[in-house]
Image (tube, rainbow, N blue to C red):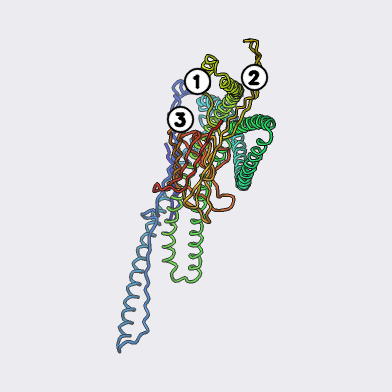
Amino acid sequence: MTEVTRTKRTLVSEGPVETTTTRKTTTYSSSGGYEGDDLSSLYKSSMSPRTTVITRSAYGSAPRGGSGYNMERSVSYGYNYGAAPAGAYSSVVGVGVNQVKGNRAQEKKDMQDLNERLAGYIEKVRFLEAQNRKLASELEQLKTKWGKATADIKAMYQKELDEARKLLDNSEKEKAALQIKVSTLEQSIEELRQKYAEALQLHESDKETIDRQNQQLSDYEAELGLLRRRVGSLEDDKARDKKEIKRLTDALNKARIDLDNETLNHIDAENRRQTLEEELEFLKAIHEQECKELACLAYRDPTQENREFWKNEMAQCLREIQEAYDEKVNSIRGEMETFYNLKVSEFKTGSAKQGMEAQHSKEESKRLRSTTQELRARVADLEIRNAQLEKELELLRREYEEKQREWEIEGNELKSELVKLRAEMEGMLKELQDIMDIKLSLELEIAAYRKLLEGEENRGGLKTLVESFMVSGGGGGGGGGYSSSSGYSQSIGYGEGDDDDDMKVSQVVKGEMSAKTTYQRSAKGPVSISECSPDGKYVALENTGKKDEPLDGWFIKRYLEDTKKEIKFTFPKGAVISSRPGQKAIKVWARGSRPAGSDDFEMQDNNTFGVGANIKTTLHNVNGEEKATHQQRTLYTS
């Protein structure tokens, strides 16, 4: 049995030390005085795998012991050129000589130690050479004994060789299968890399699309602001046109009154035509306004606003993370460049401080390594955070798509409901028109019969019957924001045969009904109530001053005298009415009445400000003081 141990050592001044030890063991067994058959019957396989031990170890410094030593030499020099007393220089020279002697003695001692170590190494080498010569002689003896029983040994090991070849073939087959599997996995990895590259490209294209859409959004917002200013100017033109129409209407009413005095028949025709036209215009205006409101409600799609909101939020979060990461990396890069530039300049300027600077550089390198490890850990944390945010973004995208589908379904349901409500409204309007026609005809007939009864006092039974009919069926109608009149003319003739006297009665009857509405405004400051919608949809305020007026805490109070009902709206915090041209007027809309795209205020408590004949609207400040009033009075005459 022979055991050979080979050791390879690598000694480095600083850093890890790697030691590799290979141990090879070979066992021989022999027996004298055996024959071939007996050998095959008595032979027992002792084949075993070769033992290889590889040991690696790392040390922070050079190994201790006889293979290494440390040598330290300190030399100090001092210079002093100042004025010294007599005899001082001789003392200085003595001190220097003693110092040199001590250094030389120390060096001599170190050299003696080194010589002793060298002598020990030489003795060890001679011992190893003698041992190698002995082992070589033993190896020669073993070689002379080999080759005598080759055929028997071959027969002994043939079976094991066959098994080893079979095992090798199986290993080759497994290796081929594993190579095929490895190639398949490499192809899969390549496909995954391509997919990852495609995903990165899609991500970059999505970023570009988001930036482009943000730019488009800013352009649309600028265009929207321009359109709002144009709408404000058109609203002012509309208000002026309304005032002009009102003035012309008053002049037309005066002309009609003058014309009524000239001809009765022409007045009847004009009144009938005016009644039908005003009623038609009123119904048409109501119908158009409701159609506009329903169309605005039907075509108002908030999906685009929500989509842009989530896109902006997600893009802002990603930009903030990227900016923080870039800023940290740039600061670290700047610090390291500054530090290394400073160190290079210091190395160039002086060599006397090289040892101290080297030590400091080592410490600084350790510090920078620790800092780099910390930064890598932070980068890993930031990457994990980025992955989490991307997952959250994907979840929010899916949730947004689900919400969008729900909103589309709800929008379709609302559109179908809108069509149904529009059909019902048309039916109700038609029914209302029929009822108003019937009411008007009944009022005309009642007026005609009243005139006949006043001329025929002796027909008391018929008069009582008509009066009872008036009491039970004549209570209809309501308030409105327009004037109406009606006329009816009838000629009746009949005869009686008492005492052979004939009598003919011819009578003309005219009935008329009108409503007159007056408005009265007052203000105790630059802010006034400019308009109140007759249908209770909005209240408009106007700033006549030269500076912006804050409305924080102000409130509008609207009192309906007919129903004794009071409606109140309080302005939110930060509300301001501007003094710039085109923006001096604001409106407060009832719930559900504000047009799409308008930035005016909206009352959330009530869907109307109320309608009636006598209404008083007031504006109060934070302290409850009345700053503006708007009074509406409607008088009905027949």
Q: Closer to the camera, 416 or 306?
A: 416
Q: Name the residue beneath numbered marker 1.
A: 471
Q: Name the residue beneath numbered marker 2.
A: 505
Q: Earlier in the sequence, mark 3 or mark 2?
A: 3
Kindly check if marks 3 and 1 are in contact, taking CB atoms under 8 A apart as contact: no
Circle 3 packing at 10 Å, graded few (<14), some (14-19), many (20+), is: few
Q: Residue at x 47, y 70 (%)?
A: 351
At mark 2, the secondary structure is loop
Q: Closer to the camera, 429 or 108?
A: 429
Q: Provide residue 178's location: percent of width, then percent of height.
A: 57, 29
- Label ID, residue 496: none
**Number of callouts in the render?**
3
Q: Closer to the camera, 238 or 10?
A: 238
Circle 1 packing at 10 Å, graded few (<14), some (14-19), many (20+), is: few
Q: Provide residue 169's location: percent of width, then percent of height.
A: 57, 26
Residue 272 in sight: yes
Q: Calculate the distance from the C-alpha at mark 1 to the C-alpha at mark 2.
A: 27 Å
State left or right for residue 10 relative to residue 636: left
Q: Name the residue beneath numbered marker 3.
A: 48
